[in-house]
Image: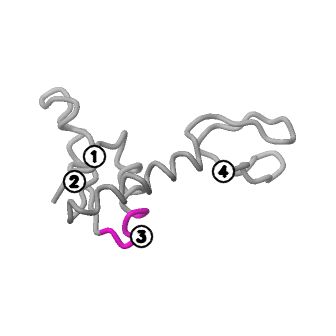
Amino acid sequence: MKRLLHARHAFEAHHWVNLLRAAGIPAQVQGEYLAGAFGDLPADACAAQVWISNPKDEPLARSLIEEAQRAHPAGPWRCACGEAIEAQFFACWRCGEARPD
């Protein structure tokens, strides 16, 4: 087993694990329930982590995650209709237009 990354939260960790599994890379989330120990344990020990089964898969796993982050950058965006949309939404709430790539 090889730790690939610390996620910002469990939802993000599960997202990356699903992406990796879809590409045929065995992966799992560890530490997702440690957030309640924050303060008693160091912050980095309380973060959800993504682990891969085979260390040889690390270069491919990292490139898949980097590609996904480039395709959908984390940050607010502006729809063609002019509405400001928060980063987590992939469609405009006002007109239904999909987030541009």
Q: Which residue does the image show at 15% across and 60% down from the upper left?
A: 1
Image height of 4 relative to 27, above or below: above
User: What secondary structure is marked by label 2?
Assistant: strand
Q: Locate residue 69, reporting x and y percent.
A: 51, 46
Q: Residue furthest left?
A: 40
For the stretch drawn in magenta, what is the main secondary structure? Answer: helix
Q: Locate residue 24, reporting x and y percent.
A: 36, 73
Q: Earlier in the sequence, mark 2 or mark 4?
A: 2
Q: Locate residue 94, reporting x and y percent.
A: 81, 45
Image height of 77 relative to 3, above or below: above
Q: Earlier in the sequence, mark 1 or mark 3?
A: 3
Q: Tell me which amino acid carries mark 3.
A: Ala
Asked whether 80 or 67 is in front, the reply is: 67
Q: Is residue 21 on the magenta stretch?
A: yes
User: What secondary structure is marked by label 4?
Assistant: loop
Q: Which residue is mark 2?
A: 30
Q: Which residues are magenta?
A: 18-25
Q: Which residue is mark 3?
A: 23
Q: Tell me which amino acid carries mark 4.
A: Phe
Q: Earlier in the sequence, mark 2 or mark 3?
A: 3
Q: Which residue is mark 4?
A: 90
User: What secondary structure is marked by label 3?
Assistant: loop
Q: Earlier in the sequence, mark 4 or mark 3?
A: 3
